Structures are given as structure tokens and as C-alpha cells.
Image: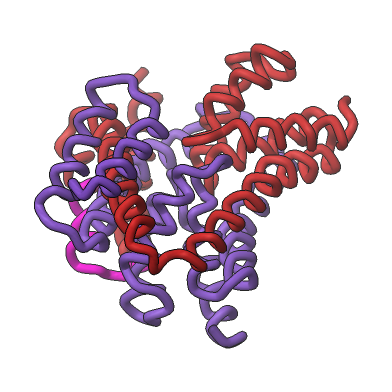
Chain colours: A red, B purple
Amino acid sequence: MRSAAEIFLTFARIGISGFGGVNFWLRRILIQEKRWITDAEFLEGFAVGQIIPGPNVYNLSIMIGHRMGGWAGAFAAVAGIVGPPLLITVALGLAYRRYQALPVLQHAIGGMAAVAAGLVIANGLMLAAALPRRARQWIFLLLGFAGIGLMHWPLLYVMAGLGPLAVWLAWRDETGRRAAG
Amino acid sequence: MSAYDIAGLFWHVLLLGAVAVGGLSTVMPDIYRYMVEEQALISGREFADAYAIAQAAPGPNALWVALVGLQAGGVAGALAAIVAILLPATTFTCVAIALHARRPDAPLALALRRGLSPVAVGFMLASGWVLVRSVEHGWQGYALTAATVFAVMRTRLNPLVLLALGAAAGIVGLV
């Protein structure tokens, strides 16, 4: 067991180091440097975190914090991974609110926003490429994209329409495969 | 932004936080729809700017939610948005810990992950589409977005380097 203070400081360091994504520093500091968890444990937590709604890195931090220091550790991990970077981000946002009318800032952030859009699209395309190559996958992907991106339907409705069907079909595959195998 | 607006934002983001399987970029289009199109709390440009700033800042990418809240309602808006989006994640994760849910290969867990993945990826691509549309710029901006997609998929350049290049391109008037 580790103290809540040590867990907080460790996750705060990860949060502040994590320019452009925390995942890399989470692995480097927790697995390689501190040896709090192994690679296999990390991947297992990552897989569990993927099913839970919300940011995966955040869910994983709660799980690791809990393992290292109980519920106090979980709380310390949350405070560390979110708190300090939130303060920095809000400070940047307040500066933006104050100076957003300056043309040079508008141009700079306009360029960054075009890049940020590209980052999101590239991330989505890489994940799409990693999906199993089955027609059903593409149908659900296109329905999700069209419902939200083209039709502008509320996400809760689209999720309620597609989610249960998608999970049921995957469940049928899974149980069928196990029964056969 | 009134207390009523902040409560409305909190409730909307809270519901989305409960279905954000696959990360927060899956629910970005709906937060955009609510804040920009339905409630007109901020402009599309401000939404995209806030997202871009959060990408360049340290910490979990999820902090863009705090920044769009900040743009709409100051520090109270930022806190309302980030607490609302993280509260469901916190609750579900704590329940998973309490239930000793350490079986990512259990049939239901696999069905959830495999079934929802394509839907989540579709939502994520819709997020990119929303960002592209919300930035009003000419063909140069679209070219920069396309070049970024290519750079991410074909090179190992750090996203921060790409964001800095984008800022530079904006300052010298290319975008």
C-alpha cells in the first residue's frame, strides 16, 4: 500500500507531463519507473476501462489508485490526474477569453483547430481500420456516423437505437462461438 | 449564463457521460449540438478553439469539456461541465472495483466491447466532422486538416508538433 500523498503526487506528475495525451506517461511512470503494475495488468485494466463510459485514462487511474492505496488512493489518483492539468487548462482558457479578439491569436488557434480536427479524424480512421473486417461492423459504424454527424439526432436516441442491437448481435456471436468451440 | 443554464448544461453532460463508451470524443457532437445549435451558449468557432487549446494543454484529453464549459459560463461552467462528464465514469468505475470486475474476457464484457466499438468509432468520426464544419475557413483549412490526417497515419510525429505547425500556418496567413 502506498500513501495517498504519494499516489496524488505520482498521478499529478503524469497529468502534467501528459501534453497531447496521458497514456504514454501513465505507462512509462507506473510500469517502468515505479513498477506499481505490470504491462499485463495495465492492458487488463485498459480493457475493463474500455467498457466503462468515460475517459479510459481516467477510469484506469481510479483502478490503479485503488489498488495502490484503497479508496483514499483512488481519490488521490483522480485529484492528481485531473486537478493540476485542469488548473493549467482553465488558466489557458481564461487567457483565450480575454484575448480571443486579437487577430494573431485567432489565426494561430484557427490553424490549431484545423489540426485538431485532423487528429480526431485520424484517430477514428485508425480505430476503424482495426475493427474486424465484417459488413456488420461497417454498417454500425456508418449508422453511428450518419445519425450523429449528418442527421444531428440526439446521441442518446441513436445510442438507444443502435447499442442494444449491436451488443446483442455480438453476444450471440460470442456465446455461439463458445458453444461451438 | 444563468444558474438555470448551468444546471441544464450539467444535466445534459451528465447523461452523455453515462453513455460515453469509447471515450469522450464519442459524445463531442452531442455536446456541440446542445451548446452551439440548441442553446446557443457559445459559437461553433469558440467550441473548436476550446477543443484545440485543450489538445495543446497537458493532462487528459477529456479536459476540453471543461474548456467549452468555461467559454460558456466562466469557472462555474467549467466546473459544472467537467464534474458532470466525470461523475458517471467515477461511479461506474467504483462499482466495477467493488464488484471485482477483473474479467475483461467474460462473454458480456466482450459483447459490450465488440458490439459498441463500431458505433463508438462512427461517433468519433462524426466528432471530427463537427470540428471540420465548425471552423469557418477556406480550402487551405481543409487541406491542413487532410495533411494532419495523413501525417498522423503515415508518420510518428508528435501531435504537439502538428498543433504547433498548425498555429504557425495560421499566424503566417496560410490558413
Q: Position of residue A91 (x, y in %)?
A: 61, 56
Query: In this rendering, would B15 be left or right of A150?
Result: right
Query: In this rendering, would B79 be left or right of B66?
Result: right
In the image, is residue B90 part of the stretch drawn in magenta? no
The magenta region covers: A141-157
* Helix, strand or loop for the magenta stretch, by majority: helix
Q: Measuring 30% from the left and 55% from the top, which residue is drawn there?
A: A107
Q: Measuring 19% from the left and 30% from the top, which residue is drawn there?
A: B150
Q: Measuring 50% from the left and 41% from the top, which residue is drawn there?
A: A51
* Position of A37 relative to B82 (above/below): above
Q: Position of residue A29 (x, y in %)?
A: 66, 20
* Position of A33 relative to A138 (above/below): above
Q: Is residue A62 visible?
A: yes
In the image, is residue A149 part of the stretch drawn in magenta? yes
Q: Is residue A164 visible?
A: no
Q: Quadrant of the C terminus of chain A?
A: top left
Q: Nearer the viewer, residue A50 or B109?
A: A50
Q: Quadrant of residue A68?
A: top right
